[in-house]
Image (cartoon, rainbow, N blue to C red):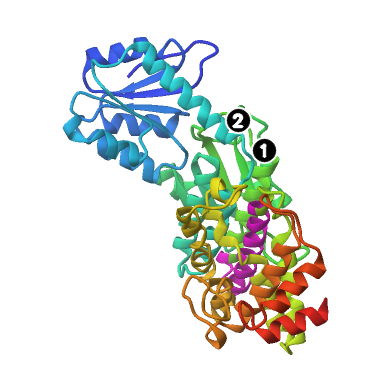
Amino acid sequence: MSTHKTCMKLGTVLIIEDELHFRTYLQSIVKREFHYLTASSWSEAKSLLYENSIDIVLIDLRLPDLSGRNIAHNLLTNFPYELILFVITGYEDEWDREKALREGVTCYFIKGSFSPDELLVRMREATLQRERKRTTELGSRTLLKLYEFTNTLTSLDTLDRVMEAVIRMIQSVTGCMRISIMLLSEDGQYLFIKKAIGLEEEVVKTTRIKVGENVSGRAFSGRKIISSDGHGIDRRFFSYKEKGPFMSIPLQEVPYRKGKMPIGVINLTNRATDEGFLENEKKLLTYIANSASIAIKSELRKEALEKSAIDTLILLINVVEARDRYTRGHSIRVGEYAAEISRRLGFNEESVKEILYAGQLHDIGKIEVPDSILLKKGKLSHKEFEIMKRHPITSVRIVDHITYFQPITGSFLHHHERYDGKGYPDGIGDDEIEIGARILAVADAFDAMTSDRPYRGAMTRDQAKRILQSERGHQFDPQCVDVFLEYL
């Protein structure tokens, strides 16, 4: 293994190549613009990946202990932060180029068929593209991941599985390679490691931190996050090798009770980058820690996590709609309209609340509709409309694990059905359509008609009311139209 570092480099490259001469050749190219590390096998590469901040991996497909293809699959599937993968091989039959690119490889080169400048250009472009992607703050993908995390916790039935899910979630959003969950001992005097990754077994077994001492003990007793502001590690607080920024997050009991001690702490170090933790990340990690605390406190877990999942989804739909100024606030208004209709139909307040939530989340499936379709100004093509028509199915897939929504999944699935049976996705009509979906159809259509769209201006309320009246018994449930017009 060797390293080479100079100033003003674009990142760090790991070269996994067992042939010495070609490895040396790659080093001579890479060092012009990048730091580099080298390994001749997967066993060497693995330790380097977990101890260093790697941006790009150059992989040969024929290696002594594990094929480059298997290494690539391992990194794409299991690695906690996004790596840029380049395949450089002399054996195309080991892994077809098109398959490799489809499965996540960024670039695929054949030995002897590329120039040094070509390789550097592609590496530079891939690095800059990833950095542009990373500059986007907490976006819809992260929120969806957060929702799936909180939803997953409700289905886990052991403490070990809960902690495993928490650690993997933190890895995926921070890129930290060393994470531990510490719990308070029965006598309340010290914290011990219950679950960890990136730590040797002996460290896990023997580490004991007194309450109020070191980073973990102080975060616990002070009930607040303690983190570094960047690169430095205070060696007074760490008895084993650490690098990069660190953070210790108390696991507060939820709901919080004054004077109640946390149940433990989560520690993060060995981040994939040397950047300190941002405020948005701290907020996100606090949310994760709170969800973890609830899951660990099993008697509170079910009720609080379902509410947490719904809140995350509502936040997510707001992010989705913020992409398009024409739909901003649409779901909130649909929820309010739907709640008024259901209330006037005689629903009890709990059922009204269900319809309110369904209205706010009825379009959550649009998270998977590409912007090129969602924000298109002209008429959708047949193929584009078929993609758009899938969003109710996606909505159900996203919410169907929440017990709260299970009685009303039809509201999500069928809010684009028509009373005359000419809607989608199932083409059902009349009373076959769940009442919640019939309510949402009226509320959704009215708000859409009275809002600006890329392809037309907003209708007046009177114009929209006349259309509702004319479609009474055709597109819409007559009773739902009647009570809504009465409300308006």
Dividing the picture into quadrants, the one containing residue 358 is bottom right
Whole-percent x, y for residue 2 in the image:
35, 16
C-alpha span from label 1 to label 2: 9 Å
Q: Could you tell me the amino acid type at mark 2?
A: Glu
Q: Would you say the residues marked 1 and 2 are in contact, meaning their CB atoms lie under 8 Å apart?
A: yes
Q: In front here: 447 or 399? A: 447
Residue 403 among those drawn in magenta? no
Whole-percent x, y for residue 268 in the image:
56, 42
Residue 297 vertical position relative to residue 134 in the rendered view, above or below: below
Helix, strand or loop at disc 2? loop
Whole-percent x, y for residue 332 in the image:
73, 64
Point out the stretch of residues depicted in magenta: 295-320
Q: Is residue 73 left or right of residue 131?
A: left
| Callout 1 crowding tier (Cα within 10 Å): few <14, some 14–19, many ≥20 | few
The majority secondary structure of the magenta stretch comes to helix
The residue singled out by tag 1 in the image is: 278
The residue singled out by tag 2 in the image is: 275
Residue 112 vertical position relative to residue 152 in the rendered view, above or below: above
Q: Could you tell me the amino acid type at mark 1?
A: Leu
Q: Is residue 222 left or right of residue 438?
A: right
Helix, strand or loop at disc 1? loop
Residue appearing at x 73%, y 50% in the figure: 222
Dividing the picture into quadrants, the one containing residue 248 is top right
| Total numbered labels placed on residues in the image | 2
Can see residue 16? yes
Q: Is residue 386 left or right of residue 231?
A: left
Whole-percent x, y for residue 486 in the image:
81, 82
Residue appearing at x 28%, y 33% in the figure: 43
